[in-house]
Amino acid sequence: MDVKKFVLIRVYGAQCSVYLFFSILAFLVSLLAAPAVSAEDTAYLDELLGSAREMRLSGERYWDILVHYKPSGSGRKSLVDDPKFFLAPDGKKNPEAELEATIKSLFQEDKADEEHPRCRFIARYTWLKERLNIDEARLPPATCTKFNEALASINPKSAALIFPATHINSPASMFGHTLIRIDSSYRSELLSHAVNYAAVTTDSNGFLYAFKGIFGFYHGYYSNLPYYEKVSEYSDLERRDMWEYKLNLSEEEVRRMLMHIWELKDIYSDYYFFDENCSYNLLFLLEAARPSVNLTDRFSGVRFWVIPTDTIRAIKESGLIVGVKYRPSQATRILFKASHMAGASQKVSIEVAGGKKSPQSVLEMGIAPEEKAKILDLSAELLQYKYSRKQISKDDYLKLFLPTLNARSTLGTPDPASDAIPPPVAPEKGHLPGKFSFGPGYRDDSAFMEIGWRAAYHDLLDPDDGYIEGAQVNFFDLRGRYYFKEDSLRLESLRFIDIVSLSPWNTFFKPVSWKVNTGFDRKILSDGEQHLIYRVNPGGGFAYKTPFLGLSYIMLETDVNLSDRLKHDYSVGFGVSAGVFKNIGDSWKINLSAQSLYYEIGDEHRSMKASLATNYKITTDSGLTLTVSREKTFDYYQSEMKLLWNLYL
C-alpha cells in the first residue's frame, strides 16, 4: 500500500475514533445527568407534545407574542437576544423547537421552585395549561413563591400608558419615551409601579451614545420601579410634562401582562434607537395582556423607525385608551404661576426661595392678600424645584420651606381652580412625523420642481400643536429638484440629522440654545456654480420669547464644508445667525432669519444669507410653505423662491 495513503487512513481513522469516543461519553454523561422520568411521565409528555403538534400551537399568535417572534426571511425569529430566554438551542429561530422544549421542561424535577420553568416562564406555562388542558397533578410540584409574593405586593388592578413629553434641551427626550403604570388598590397613583424598557448605558459622550443607540450596541432591559421615582425623574429633574393614558384592561388582563413581565426579568434585547426602542418593546406587554389587539405588526417591515407618539396613536386606535390626564412638570407649574404675577412679585418669590427675604416679611408687605399668597406659593415651588435638582441641601431646604408653608397657611386655602394649568394639545393629536413635500420654485433665471421626503419628526416651521415650540428634530431629510431650463434632475440636499433647541431665557430658567446638523447640501463655490458638499454645522446661543416678537434667537456657529470641488478640499467657517419665529393665530407661522459666516481655514470666503419663510396649516396633516431667500457666497449672488405643499405621513 502507498505510504501516503496508509498515513492518511490512520490519521482519519484516529480522528473518527476520538470523535466516536467523545460522542459516546457525552451521551452517557447526559443519561447520568438527566433526571429520571417515569414511564407514566413519558407517556403524558408524549401526549402533550402530540396535542401541541396537532393543534399547531407553535404557529399561534400568542406564542409569537410571548417569545417576541417576528417574520424573518422564510421563517420567524425572536427579537429577544438573551440566550437565557430560550430553552431550545435554536429557540430564537425555531418556534416549534422552543415550544416543545418548553413543554418538556415542565417535567423537570431537578430545579428549585423559582428556577423551575413553570415559575421562570409562568406566562408560557399558564397559556399552555389552558390550551392543552394540562393536569398539574401529573407534573412535578412547583410553588412559585417569589412570583406570588411579587404579585401580592403589586396587587394589580388596572394600568395606564405614560408618556413623558419632550424636554427641549435634551436631544434624546425630543424623540419621546413611554412606560406603563400598574395601578393597585392604593388611592395614590404615586404608590403604583412603573414598567419601563430602556437601554443600559454609562456613556456620557453624546456622539458615542447616539452611534451605539442607532446601531444596536446597547442592551435593553425591562424594569419595574415605583412610579413616584419616574415622576421625580421626568417631572422634577428633566422638566418634562407627563401624559397619562388610562387603559381599559381588566384585572385579569393586567395579571397576564405582569406574568410576561416576570418572564422578561433580567433578559436583554439589543436596543435600537429608531425601531426596537422603549415604545415598541412595551407593545408586546399590551399584546400579552390582550392578544386580540395587533400593535407590533403595525411597525414591522413598513419603515425603519418607531416614534413614541405613533405607538400612542396605534394604542388609541385599538380601543385601549379610555381617558387622558395631564401632569405638568415643576418647571411648567413655576412658569404658570409666574405668568399671573407682576415682575416685582416674581422678584420677591426668588428672594424668598434664595433666603434673601423671610416669608414673614411677605406678610408685612402692603399688598393684597391674594398677591402675598401667590408670592409664597411660587416661593414654595421654587424651593421644591431647587431641592429636587440638588441645588440646595436638605437642611437648607427645610429651613426655608417650612417657614414658607407656615406663612402661606395664614392666608387661607388656595383655590384649586386658580392653580389648574390648562393642558396643551395632547402629543398624539399633533401632525404625523413623516413629511412629503412638493411644489414649484424659481432660482435666479431657472424654474424648478422640488420633491422632498422627511422620515421624522418635526421642524421649527411645522405646526406646534402636540409638540414643543422651539424644538426641531429631523432625521433623514431628502430633497431633489428638476430644473426645466437645464432639463436636469439632481439631489438638492440630504440631511441625516438636523436638531435645533430654542429654549427661551426667562426670570427663572436660563438654558443654552443650540443646534447641530450634518449631511449633503448644495452650495455656490468659487466657479459660480452650485456643487454638492458635505457639511457639519453646530452652534450655540440664546433664545428669548416676547408677546410682540415671538420666539427670537441668536447663535454663534461653526460650519465645516468638505468637497473635492474646493481647492483645499475643505473650508471651515465661523459666524453668527439670528432669527425670529412668530405665530399668527392658530394657522400661520412666520420665520425671518439671517446668517453670516467667515471661512478662514481652507478655502477662504464669506457667506451671507437672509430668508423669510411662512407656513400655513390647512389641516393637522397638511399645509403650505412659502420661502424667499437671498444669499451671497464667493461674491456670487443668488435669489430663490419656492412654494411647497406639505403632507404629513
Image (cartoon, rainbow, N blue to C red):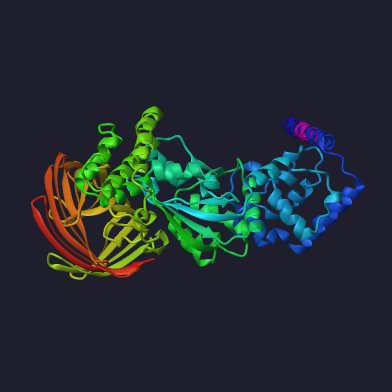
Return the x and y of residue 280 as percentages of the image width and height: 51, 54
By secondary structure, the bulk of the magenta-drawn segment is best described as helix
Give the side of residue 366 with respect to residue 127, left or right: left
Give the side of residue 271 with respect to residue 434, left or right: right
Whether residue 488 is visible: no
> Which residue occupies 27% across, 56% down?
460
Q: Which quadrant is the N terminus positioned in? A: top right
Return the x and y of residue 146 as percentages of the image width and height: 70, 40
Q: Which quadrant is the C terminus positioned in? A: bottom left
Whether residue 639 is visible: yes
List the single residue furthest toward the right. 39
Task: Provide the residue span drawn in magenta.
Answer: 13-21
Return the x and y of residue 376 as percentages of the image width and height: 31, 42
The image quadrant of residue 365 is top left
Query: Is 109 above or below relative to 578?
Result: above
> Which residue occupies 12% across, 67% down?
445
Return the x and y of residue 381 as percentages of the image width and height: 35, 42
Which one is nearer the viewer's eye here, 6 or 540? Answer: 540
> Which residue occupies 58% across, 64% down?
293
Give the side of residue 280 with respect to residue 58, left or right: left
Residue 445: in magenta span? no
